Image (cartoon, coloured by chain):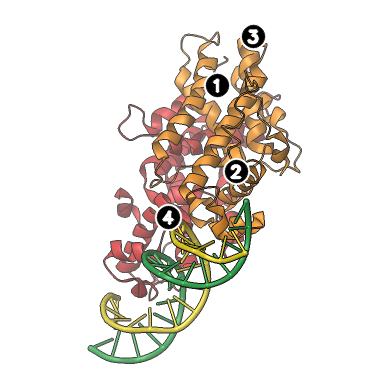
Chain colours: A red, B orange, C yellow, D green
Amino acid sequence: MAAATKTAARKTSAAAPAPRAVNKHGARRRQILEVAAARFRSHGYGAASMRDIAGEVGILAGSLYHHFPSKDDLFTAVHEEGIRRIDEAVDTALDGRTDPWARLEAAMVAHLDYLLEGGDFAVVVLRAVPADLGSRQRLVALRDAYEARFRELIEDLPLPATVGRDSLRLMLLGALNWSQTWYRRDGDTTPEGIARDFLALLRAPL
Amino acid sequence: MAAATKTAARKTSAAAPAPRAVNKHGARRRQILEVAAARFRSHGYGAASMRDIAGEVGILAGSLYHHFPSKDDLFTAVHEEGIRRIDEAVDTALDGRTDPWARLEAAMVAHLDYLLEGGDFAVVVLRAVPADLGSRQRLVALRDAYEARFRELIEDLPLPATVGRDSLRLMLLGALNWSQTWYRRDGDTTPEGIARDFLALLRAPL
DNA sequence: GTCTATATTAGGATAGAC
DNA sequence: GTCTATCCTAATATAGAC
């Protein structure tokens, strides 16, 4: 949906030479990725079919294989793009902030915003990777690398010595990621509000 | 796995007349449910096949249809059994306790214990219900009814007026449910430890 | 870059013998 | 209650024309 508008790459050192890494086949490839992300999200890997994806793109199934050599590869590409996007969103949110609590909250908001409003890519990333996928190990490693960012953000926090930082990270990320299952666009909550409320619950004693 | 040993029904008023509600076809039916729960958990609804399930049971695919009229029905039965079990586990955990905080912690431990160590049924219950499932609405309603128990437990808590009880419930259940994705049996954490740590993080100020 | 046509495999489900 | 045999559908993937 709206996620399509944020596709343009903005790497840390994006010079002139090679904008082809993400852009291998141009617009059509990006369109296929968008559609595939939506189908993988709503149907899961197993139940999403290449025919359906092709149909929604407006081409026939066989034509997909000109852009991606297999369903595995297509899923892998969606997954990688999803991680790239949410990683970039957190980058942008943290830019220029120095206060540890403000940095954590900014990262939480960016994470949630992407997860709840940013579209289908991030949702696919957060779901379990199919056990028999060829690229499984690499994808899991990519996600772990992303989550390590929160480990650092929490390490920088000035906390009482008794607080378990691992538990805090797991609780926080778990609460954020699970919000995917209950969040409704039309409700009165927003990603910002949820992040703020969760942090407040932790910082104030019950 | 170990869940098989806990199958025996122990309803609040289990008298002589009708142990047939859960027991419609006896031992074979229960065996099929166990195997199906494991496959639905590891492969998802779409990718789990009736052939595979039958094969692991030790019969052929066609024979499954003597016990369950369709794949939809089989999944629905697994789902219902999963809710019945976790509901019962929370019942047992709450039995006799009166202190509000102790009741919440006991329910959290029971919930987590079932989710992390109780086997495949509870995991299937917590995952997204396939959008095109015939019994979808009823299953969602069943899960909502289960989660309403936590709403009550949190309402009974003596909390500062500023605390949002809805946010608290969503944060707590989200953190618990998400633990499914990172928990490892061989690690040094236990369901009891996780529940205790999460509650401690909330009750003490950061 | 897409289509047509098709190979191949696998899936859910059914009928009837045993 | 299970098996055999089978129908029908749909899936991934490929080859080659356009």
Q: Position of residue B76 (x, y in %)?
A: 49, 41
Q: Are marks 2 and 4 in contact (CB under 8 Å)?
A: no
Nearest-to-viewer mark from 3 and 2: 3
Residue under label 1, please give it.
A203
Marks counted in the figure total 4
The 10 Å Cα crowd at callout 3, few under 14, some 14 to 19, many 20 or more, is few
Residues indicated by labels 3 and 2 sit on the same polypeptide chain: yes
- In the image, taking residue B142 as reference, residue A168 lies left or right, namely right
Residues indicated by labels 3 and 1 sit on the same polypeptide chain: no
The 10 Å Cα crowd at callout 1, few under 14, some 14 to 19, many 20 or more, is some
- In the image, taking residue B62 as reference, residue A155 lies left or right, namely right
Residue under label 2, please give it.
B181
Q: Which mark is residue B99?
A: 3
Query: Which comes before the other along the chain, label 3 or label 2?
Result: 3
Q: CA distance from mark 2 to mark 4?
A: 19 Å
Nearest-to-viewer mark from 3 and 1: 3
Question: Amino acid under label 2?
Answer: Thr
Residues indicated by labels 2 and 4 sit on the same polypeptide chain: no
Label 4 element class? helix
Label 1 element class? helix
Q: Are marks 4 and 3 in contact (CB under 8 Å)?
A: no
Q: Which mark is residue A40?
A: 4
Nearest-to-viewer mark from 2 and 1: 2
Nearer to the camera, D14 or B160: D14
Residue found at x 51% / y 45%: B75
Nearer to the camera, B42 or B157: B42
Q: Position of residue A23 (x, y in %)?
A: 38, 68
Q: CA distance from mark 3 to mark 1?
A: 24 Å
Label 3 element class? loop
Nearer to the camera, A94 or A32: A32
Q: CA distance from mark 2 to mark 1?
A: 25 Å
